[in-house]
């Protein structure tokens, strides 16, 4: 009997699902009940096992963020294999009616994209006159469509994708479990006979027979596995294995564990508990291949086994010189997937990396970098540079997935490897359109973390993002905003780029109570480029959200405060939620204390303050402090009248000046070399701007420089504390920063904010100011200050020159007639 296909399109999902006519009536009978349930909770997934088509919703409420190394640019074949593994139906009683299996297609995606809540009701059936057209459309839809291709390219598996390297050598077959290896399917009738035998024997079969039963049952069709796990006779077999676990040989136990992987046994199953305990007991009697294979099976089962891994690492620590290349790579993979970094192994691992560096395949090299990154393992600059040296020479032959893994550890170690970064700019822009959204995020995040600006990379990412934005997790959207804001780059499609990301942040609003750091990361990135989405800002300042940030593992108070002060300065019409005054005072005190110990005492600042006091007539004419503490950088404030004469204004206790004089910082040759040239001693002062060793900005896997602020402490009363900002928040409205505020300066003169910059205020090897510092200067101007910079490429070399030369330079900067005209 021929099967007629009816094509149906689900609301807002551009995927076509086919229904067999044998299941059509059954699907429609459940349609009304399904509709009511889904409308009550539009974000919950349809998990009914009897449904004809399964939809995996794209914005799950129980959202979790992992370091998810997606394949980024997966082949069509790999995507189809992944879809096949995820398809299939759950048959409630498959063994009693083996011949009634129905064909079904699963509609799902592994990405955590979000769409606006929609009604999940199925559309009404098409009328008969259109049946012929419908069938034709469905048949043509069998060919890959552009939309389907896009969705497949975004699909990834955090379990399978990192295992690509295992396909490169036959040795990995004995070290890992290959799910894709074809297995001869067991007929359902034979499976029923095995279960009948288990019921008759009541646990009296031998260990070898039990192992054979597990092996054969695991070869049943995939769609039968769920029914098997709930079958009482299978549970009897498991109980017998647990009871006699010590009677099984090690190879038998490994075969049982493999069968559990094929059957997708839940990680908390009692059989797995018994297996883990027994393997821990037998570790020292097993060889390294067996130990790594068992660890790999635990990974496939998604079971956390810290005790087993600890023993495995101890074993490897004793036998590390015996590790072959495949064993070493597999061990690093296990270390990464276990998110554990055995300290005593790390130095030995570096030796092994150098030993095999030229022999690794590029995929293996990517796997090693990913393992080190996931386990937060430290790696020396020497080893990291050796890895980057090799990658920079073979970057065109490297898969995007492996390359991104290298970039992850590159940014984690803060390695400014210019040859690799330059090659990245040649290769990556052309790959971005076919790269997974998470891969693009990691590429742009690496650039921003290393302060490396490449317009080709950033523009390609920006142009590709709007069409992929619904595949962004909250983390991805936030990191994109941070990366572009940090580098102060507004792409050619800036309006579409930013509006699509802000809209996605609104879609993900429900996730931010669980991941508050992502909301603040995104909002700060937007603030850097003068964008203030009102609804999201109001949400971030709610008491409930502020309390949530206090419980975060990250320090988020500073971020909150930076955002709060930036909104107060740049958006005076805002009337939404504001930060509690007590929190503002608390952070202000913390920041100022930090500045006293770490910022004001820097040699380049101490020298500038001392010389300015001498030149202007004393400490009352200059003040070294933070005019805008929420930017966490200092300023030298000087007041001038309209005739260009300095005005005394710093009337505070002179103890502060005494402290500066008593510091006694010695400008040694070594210190001057570090100030001028960073870590390199090969360049002249003229080339200093090309030696900006970056310290990336990041949080969690990358330690980002956080910006903080003062609630109302600005010299000369530049900002009034507790100013009420009045405007009613509107959904989706984006506040516009005021073009200019009334200059808050004395009528008789101008206030100078002198910036002693350093290389970390700029993009790598350039004079492009980073977003945070550009925002600071913008806000200073809005408050009526005239910004004067002592750029590091000019000031640092002068620190080695004579006092007269330095005074001459400062006189030129401070008494520039153009400053007064700018103030006017």
Image: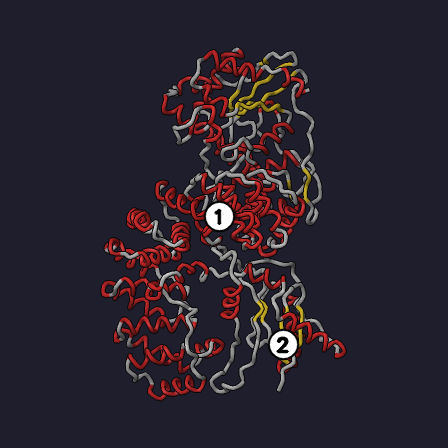
Q: Is residue 194 left or right of residue 78?
A: left
Q: Residue 616 versus residue 55: which sits nearer the camera?
A: 55
Local crowd at mark 2 within 10 Å, few (<14), some, or many (≥20)? many
Q: Distance of mark 1 from mark 2, alpha carbons?
A: 47 Å
- The x, y position of residue 710, in whole percent, is 55, 32
- The vertical placement of 629 against 275, above or below, is above
- The vertical placement of 158 against 81, above or below, is above
- The x, y position of residue 492, in whole percent, is 65, 43
Which type of secondary structure does the marked residue at label 2 adopt? strand
Q: Earlier in the sequence, mark 1 or mark 2?
A: 2
Which type of secondary structure does the marked residue at label 1 adopt? loop
Whether residue 343 is visible here, answered yes or no, is no
Q: Residue 406 versus residue 812: which sits nearer the camera?
A: 406
**Residue at 65%, 11% in the rendered image:** 643
Q: Are marks 1 and 2 in contact (CB under 8 Å)?
A: no
Residue, disc 2: 19
Whether residue 158 is visible here, answered yes or no, is yes
- The x, y position of residue 357, in whole percent, is 34, 49
Question: Which quadrant would residue 491 be assigned to in this image?
Answer: top right
Residue, disc 1: 552
- The vertical placement of 755 against 160, above or below, is above
**Residue at 40%, 18% in the rendered image:** 662
- The x, y position of residue 450, in whole percent, is 48, 40
State which quarter of the image contains the N terminus.
Answer: bottom right
Q: Is residue 330 left or right of residue 473?
A: left
- The vertical placement of 596 against 549, above or below, is above
Q: Is residue 80 left or right of residue 276?
A: right
- Eye-nearest disc, 1 or 2: 2
């Amino acid at each position: 009997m021929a099967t007629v296909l009816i094509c149906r399109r689900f609301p807002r999902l551009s995927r076509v699902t086919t229904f067999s006519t044998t299941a059509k009536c059954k699907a429609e009978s459940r349609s009304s009940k399904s509709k009511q349930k889904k409308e009550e909770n539009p974000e919950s997934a349809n998990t009914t096992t009897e449904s004809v088509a399964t939809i995996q919703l794209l914005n799950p409420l129980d959202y979790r963020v992992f370091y998810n190394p997606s394949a980024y640019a997966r082949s069509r074949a790999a995507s189809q294999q992944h879809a096949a593994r995820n398809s299939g139906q759950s048959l409630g009683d498959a063994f009693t009616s083996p011949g009634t299996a129905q064909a079904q297609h699963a509609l799902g995606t592994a990405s955590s994209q979000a769409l606006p809540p929609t009604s999940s009701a199925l559309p009404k059936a098409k009328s008969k006159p259109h049946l012929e057209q419908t069938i034709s459309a469905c048949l043509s839809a069998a060919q890959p469509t552009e939309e389907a291709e896009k969705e497949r390219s975004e699909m990834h598996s955090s379990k399978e994708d990192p295992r690509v390297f295992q396909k490169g050598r036959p040795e990995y077959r004995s070290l890992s479990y290959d799910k894709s290896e074809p297995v001869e399917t067991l007929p359902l009738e034979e499976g029923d006979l095995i279960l009948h035998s288990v019921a008759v024997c009541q646990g009296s079969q031998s260990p070898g027979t039990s192992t054979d039963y597990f092996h054969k049952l695991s070869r049943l069709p995939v769609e039968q596995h769920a029914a098997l796990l709930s079958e009482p006779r299978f549970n009897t077999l498991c109980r017998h294995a647990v009871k006699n676990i010590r009677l099984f040989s090690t190879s038998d136990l490994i075969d049982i564990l493999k069968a559990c992987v094929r059957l997708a046994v839940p990680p908390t199953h009692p059989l797995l508990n018994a297996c883990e305990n027994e393997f821990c007991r037998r570790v020292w009697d097993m060889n390294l291949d067996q130990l790594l294979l068992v660890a790999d099976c635990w990974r496939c089962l998604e079971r956390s086994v810290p005790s087993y891994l600890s023993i495995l690492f101890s074993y490897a620590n004793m036998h590390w010189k015996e590790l072959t290349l495949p064993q070493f790579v597999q061990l690093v993979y296990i270390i990464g997937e276990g998110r554990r970094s055995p300290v005593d192994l790390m130095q030995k691992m570096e030796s092994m990396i150098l030993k095999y560096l030229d022999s690794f395949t590029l995929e293996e090299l990517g796997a090693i970098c990913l393992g080190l990154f996931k386990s937060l393992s430290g790696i020396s600059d020497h080893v990291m540079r050796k890895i980057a040296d090799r990658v920079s020479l073979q970057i065109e032959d490297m898969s995007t997935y492996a390359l991104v893994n290298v970039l992850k550890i590159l940014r984690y170690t803060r390695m400014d490897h210019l040859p690799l970064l330059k090659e990245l700019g040649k290769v990556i822009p052309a790959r971005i359109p076919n790269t997974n959204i998470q891969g693009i995020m990691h590429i742009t995040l690496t650039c921003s973390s290393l302060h490396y600006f490449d317009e080709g990379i950033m523009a390609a990412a920006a142009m590709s993002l709007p069409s992929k934005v619904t595949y962004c997790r909250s983390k991805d959207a936030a990191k994109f905003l941070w990366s572009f804001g940090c580098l102060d780059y507004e792409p050619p499609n800036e309006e579409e780029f930013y509006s699509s990301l802000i809209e996605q942040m609104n879609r993900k609003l429900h996730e931010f109570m669980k991941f508050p750091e992502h909301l603040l990361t995104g909002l700060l990135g937007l603030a850097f480029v003068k964008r203030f989405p009102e609804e999201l800002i109001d949400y971030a300042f709610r008491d409930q959200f502020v309390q949530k940030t206090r419980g975060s593992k990250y320090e988020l108070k500073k971020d909150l405060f930076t955002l709060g002060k930036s909104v107060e300065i740049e958006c005076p019409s805002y009337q939404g939620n504001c930060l509690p005054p007590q929190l503002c005072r608390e952070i202000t005190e913390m920041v100022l204390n930090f500045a006293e110990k770490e910022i004001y005492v820097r040699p380049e600042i101490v020298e500038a303050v001392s010389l300015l006091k001498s030149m202007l007539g004393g400490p009352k004419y200059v003040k070294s402090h933070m005019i805008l503490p929420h930017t966490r950088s200092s300023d030298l404030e000087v007041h001038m009248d309209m005739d260009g004469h300095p005005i005394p204004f710093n009337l505070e206790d002179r103890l502060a000046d005494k402290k500066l004089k008593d510091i006694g910082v010695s400008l040694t040759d070594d210190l001057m070399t570090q100030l001028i040239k960073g870590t390199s001693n090969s360049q002249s002062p003229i080339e200093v701007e090309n030696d900006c060793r970056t310290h990336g900005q990041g949080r969690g896997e990358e330690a980002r420089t956080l910006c903080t602020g003062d609630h109302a402490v600005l010299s000369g009363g530049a900002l009034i504390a507790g100013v009420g900002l009045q405007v009613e928040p509107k959904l989706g409205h984006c506040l516009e920063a005021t073009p200019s505020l009334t200059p808050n300066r004395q009528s008789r003169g101008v206030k100078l904010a002198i910036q002693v910059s350093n290389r970390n205020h700029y993009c790598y090897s350039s004079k492009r100011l980073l977003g945070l510092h550009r925002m600071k200067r913008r806000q200073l101007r809005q408050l009526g200050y005239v910004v004067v910079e002592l750029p590091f490429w000019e000031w640092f070399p002068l620190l080695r020159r004579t006092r007269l030369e330095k005074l001459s330079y400062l006189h030129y900067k401070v008494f520039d007639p153009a400053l007064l005209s700018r103030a006017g």
